[in-house]
Structures are given as C-alpha cells and as structure tokens.
Image (cartoon, rainbow, N blue to C red):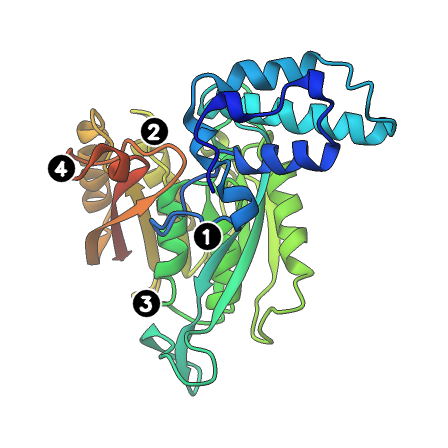
Amino acid sequence: MSIIDILDLPHASTSPPAHLLFTILSGVTIHPRSWDGAAKKLPPQLSRYAPLASNPGLSKWLTSLVANELRWIEDEDVKERVWEEAGRRLAERCGRAAMPSVTRGFRIPLPRKENGEMLGGIASEDSSGGVDYITITLYEPSMTADNLGLKTWASSFLLAKRLGISKLPLGSRALELGSGTGLVGIAAAVVLGANVTLTDLPEIVPNLSHNVSLNSSNPHLPPSVGSMSVQVLDWTNQPIPEDEGDKYPLVLAADPLYSPAHPRLLVGVLEEWVRRSREARVVVEFPLRERYEDVREDFWRRMREGGFVGVEEGVEAGWDDWGGGGEEDEEDEEERKGKVRCWWGVYRW
C-alpha cells in the first residue's frame, strides 16, 4: 500500500523509530534516471513512499527532521546518520548543481573477438548468461564552481559503449582528452586492451586518479585489460611530442566542446598527438546542444582543414542527469527529461 499524502508521514512528536526514518528517507530519494532510459525499481518497503518524492510538502518535513534534536534516539551515531540522510534528500531538491556526491556503476558491453580481432559487434547472448558486461564504478563529488569534469555525461557513456562496436585498434596506446570522471578511458583499457593515458585539467585530475585506482583493483577485469595512467594536459599550454613514437594511434574525446574556443584548441591537440599513419583513429562524441551549432560547424571545418578524414559517423540518443541536448520531439515531457541526442564520429588521416 502506498503512502499517498504528506500527512501520512510520522511527526517528530510521535518519536518514530530510527529504522522507520531510514526507510522513509530511502523511499523518497530522487534517483537519477537510468542512463539506459529505464526507471529504477524499488523494493516494496521503499516504493510505498516513492509517490511523495515529488511532493512539494516533503521539503518541510525533511527540514523539521534536520532541525529536531531526535532525543528519543539514544545512539548519537544513528542521530547523525538521520540528519545526514535528511540533508541529502534536501540537497537533491535544490537543483542538479546541488546534487550530493555519488558513486555509481556503468555497465559496458564487451566486444566479440576472434584471434585478437574485434568483429565489430557486441558479444552475442547465450544460454550461460547473455551478453558479457563489465561494470565501471565512478565517484562523482559534489560539483563546485564550474568544474563540469566532476560529472559524467551522456556522450561519455555512449562512447564507452561504442568502443566495442566500432572497429578500433586493439592493444594499442590510447590518449583520452578531457577525461573527466574517466569512463571512456577506463572502458578503452578494458574493452580494447589499450594502454590508456587519461588527461584533464589540474582540478579534475585528483578525482580522475581516484576513479582509475578504484577500477584498477576490480577483480572482474578481463586478463586483456590494458594499463591506465593519469596526467595533466592543458590544451592552452600543451607539451609537444618529441618524436612520432610519442604520438598515439588512438585518441578519444567525449563532450569536448562547450566553449567557442574549444574547436581550435581541440583540433590543435589532435594535430600534435595523433600518430601520422592511416591506421590511427580519432573518436569523438558530443551532444547536439542548442545554440552550439556554430561551435560544432567550426570543429568539423577545422578537422577537414587539418587533414582528418571521416570514416564513419552517426547520431544516437542517451540519458544523463542534465539532459538538454538535441531538438524537441513529440515525446511526453517526463519521458524526455534527461534525454540527450549525441553526434559521434571516427576519423583517420
């Protein structure tokens, strides 16, 4: 039976037990929509409170809980946990930029391989358990200032899953630009067996390094997993490779364009760091954000002028906590919320 009214929640004057408060606080959590577009299923004891998650009156109840001394709860540690969880529920209702830190897993399909060659598709389902996946675990701290690299974006998840579909070099060296939380670079090490250098700005690198360490110790990694290292790379002050051997046969970039200056900077980095061979590949994916048409056109033009040739490209849809990518369509607003249309492309010299 569902709780259908905010007045059904226990008042502090009734001294509700801590276990009930924890159940309610878990039940009214605003869960990020599944990035595969599916709604999160809750167990029955939590789902009965779920209808209240969007009730405007819930914030008042949460505030009263945070402000209460909870004298009937004797364990001080339990009190702290109640206040902390109530505070988290309030933060979830203060906008996406106020989202608390979160650790979550992303399921990445593993490719079909034969004699070391990628066959261009995802491992087929079989009676022993279906498609093979690896779960990449990422920690996303609370966002501060405009550090967008502390969050994972739809284009990163889509590109990470695409690594097992596009025919890319296996077991080679790879460079990821603007790694953020590290999803694409970690996936490249796992899916392609690449030795990956993940890069970003100094303020992003500590969390990026944490996520690389977190996944390096995963006991379920395949034996073919490549190495992962993290470095600072500022596109405005990049080092120049000393010789061709320092360059990379595979360069990856997800959501690299969110400023008019980025096309020039990104293509400049690619021209320096992509190995000059016909086998070398650049894989880029970014959302089709409104008002960024000129930025995208500038990127595509600069890639052509820089000598890069498109091998394949496409548009696909994904989900993230932010949405706002792509043209409006006729889907229901609630279903469309969080949906992002992204362009992807594979280049060679």
As displayed, is residue 171 above or below residue 344? below
In the rendered image, which residue does mark 4 sit on?
329
Mark 4 closeness class: few <14, some 14–19, many ≥20 residues within 10 Å:
few
Q: Residue at (41%, 56%) from the top-left corner? A: 160
In front: 176, or 15? 15
Q: Spatial distance from mark 3 to mark 2, Cα to Cα?
A: 26 Å
Picture coordinates of residue 208, whole percent (x, y): 59, 42
Q: Disc 1 vs disc 4: Cβ atoms closer than 8 Å?
A: no
User: Residue 311 sits in which quadrant?
Assistant: bottom left
In the rendered image, which residue does mark 3 sit on?
165
User: Residue 153 sits in which quadrant?
Assistant: top left
> What number is the disc on residue 184?
1
Mark 3 closeness class: few <14, some 14–19, many ≥20 residues within 10 Å:
some
N-terminal-most mark, 1 or 4: 1
Mark 2 closeness class: few <14, some 14–19, many ≥20 residues within 10 Å:
some
Q: Nearer the viewer, mark 4 or mark 2?
A: 4
Name which residue type carries label 2.
Tyr
In front: 72, or 34? 72
> What number is the disc on residue 170?
none
Q: Is residue 35 left or right of residue 172?
A: left
Name which residue type carries label 4.
Asp
Q: Spatial distance from mark 1 to mark 4, Cα to Cα?
A: 29 Å
Name which residue type carries label 3.
Ile
In the rendered image, which residue does mark 2 sit on?
258
Picture coordinates of residue 122, whole percent (x, y): 35, 72
Furthest-bottom residue in this view = 115
Label 4 sits on a secondary structure element that is loop
Label 2 sits on a secondary structure element that is loop
Q: Nearer the viewer, mark 4 or mark 3?
A: 4
